[in-house]
Image (tube, coloured by chain):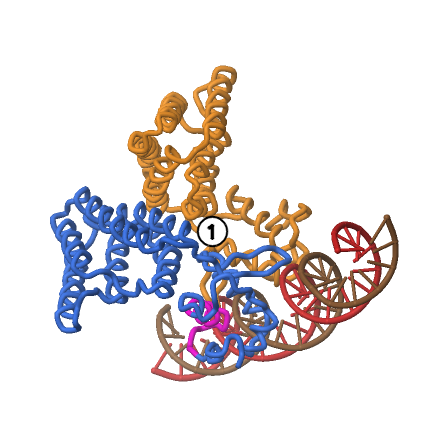
Chain colours: A blue, B orange, C red, D brown
Amino acid sequence: MSEFATLSSVTNSSSTLSAELTSTLRDAIITGEIAQGAKLSEAKMAKELDVSRGPLREAIRRLEGMNLIQHIPQQGARVVVLSRELVLQLYDTREALESKAVALAAEKMSSQEIDQLHREIDAQSKQMRENSGAFVPAESDYRFHEMVVRGSKNKVIERALIHELYNLIKMFRYQNDFANTSSTNSLVEHRQIVYAIEQRDPILAEVTMKRHIVHARERIERRMLIK
Amino acid sequence: MSEFATLSSVTNSSSTLSAELTSTLRDAIITGEIAQGAKLSEAKMAKELDVSRGPLREAIRRLEGMNLIQHIPQQGARVVVLSRELVLQLYDTREALESKAVALAAEKMSSQEIDQLHREIDAQSKQMRENSGAFVPAESDYRFHEMVVRGSKNKVIERALIHELYNLIKMFRYQNDFANTSSTNSLVEHRQIVYAIEQRDPILAEVTMKRHIVHARERIERRMLIK
DNA sequence: TAAACTCTAAATGTTGACATTTTAACGAAA
DNA sequence: TTTCGTTAAAATGTCAACATTTAGAGTTTA
């Protein structure tokens, strides 16, 4: 049984091998299939995935840019370790960026985009009623937040959050039983956020989002006593 | 005369060639020696710099992670174009991140670090008195802001700002005669920021920094009428 | 026993050649 | 004249071999 067993199928359909490797490794890191702190040995992985080291190295450089990997010259690359401290820092950063994003979104989102937000929230509400339902599914939560961030129309914030921060947050939640967010609060807060956007009230939107993220941070702070 | 003439001396002393190339190209992009929107032809550059394409490609991947370069599969890499819109988005992002950073810094900076801030400001004041003096030199301004950001002790914010945003802002200022910031206001605002940190007042620090960056954004908005 | 040295194996860094895709110039047809 | 198709050159993507550095096992020495 090989170390990177289930990775073996790099058979997606991206345009380049290097891009596929990036996405394959990204997922493997987020799920923990490649463990935190693990060394990414180029030789082993290349053999495992049946590719040459060139594209693999490029993928590693890209993951470095996403903060999923830390690289030390002449020593190689390791998967980032999500210490309690780092996770809390992630949420502080997210608070700053996403509260600004929602303020901009309140000014710039189209009504069609706001409709989409409504549909996502309604789906969340429905899923909660049907499936036992104390939780908003993580995937739906991500979709909601991504829609808000894209609504800001700010490419810089969008990239910082979606391309970098969210990957680390997904990684944390996936590997720490935070797969679902607490429902009652989250859904209510999502509604408040959409309300503020609908009212075209940037300040209210910002405050509401800030509180939403601070609550998430507090839940984590309470539960991550160790590390 | 070659296209990348003055780049020819990749003779620094980083540990790896790829790291040197990253830093060389970074500087060339910031200064505009390689123009905005220019295509980075691997073959030409490799010959020009007398290196093989491998390390060059790795450097390009890293610059991609810094948002200095945009890469399209099968088409190659181009230097980012700093449109008016993008620059204003940069400052909105900076406002969000740096105001959070200074709030954290107000709680976490050591008194030695605060002393350093004082020394930097005093130097700014002195330089202004001596050299005709309507401007804070850009280099000193960067040092001041970097010290504040590092003072936050938040590695995520630190990386987002220093590793990514600041490069783009330096690039913009270097290529658009914003090499120096307006003095009177900036120096006073720097003093206010240090005061707030000294008082261990995160909220005051945050508001003060926010205003400082909004002012900079407004100056840019007024002067960049075109594009 | 502990520290320092040597040497070997394994890993990362670098190179040049090969493969595939894109681009654009050229010519033919509507 | 414009459009479409062909083709050759140039560019990006990929690979495998070579070079250099690091890490660790084993040995020697204080």
Q: Is residue A190 left or right of residue B75?
A: left
Q: Is residue B92 left or right of residue C18?
A: left
Where residue B134 appears, x then y in whole percent?
43, 20
Where residue B201 appears, x then y in whole percent?
32, 29
Q: Is residue A181 left or right of residue B177?
A: left
Q: Foreground: B221 or A111? A: A111
Quarter location, residue B90: top left
How many circles with numbers are drawn on the protein?
1
Judging by the rendered image, the residue that carries numbered circle 1 is B66
Q: Residue at x 38, y 21 (%)?
A: B184
The C terminus of chain A lies in quadrant: bottom left
Q: Residue at x 33, y 54 (%)?
A: A158
Kind of residue at badge 1: Met
Where residue B111 appears, x then y in whole percent?
46, 28
For the record, the magenta segment spans A12-27
Q: Is A85 within the magenta? A: no
Is residue B135 among what the camera can see? yes
Name the magenta segment's main secondary structure.
Answer: helix
Where residue B88 appears, x then y in whole percent?
33, 42
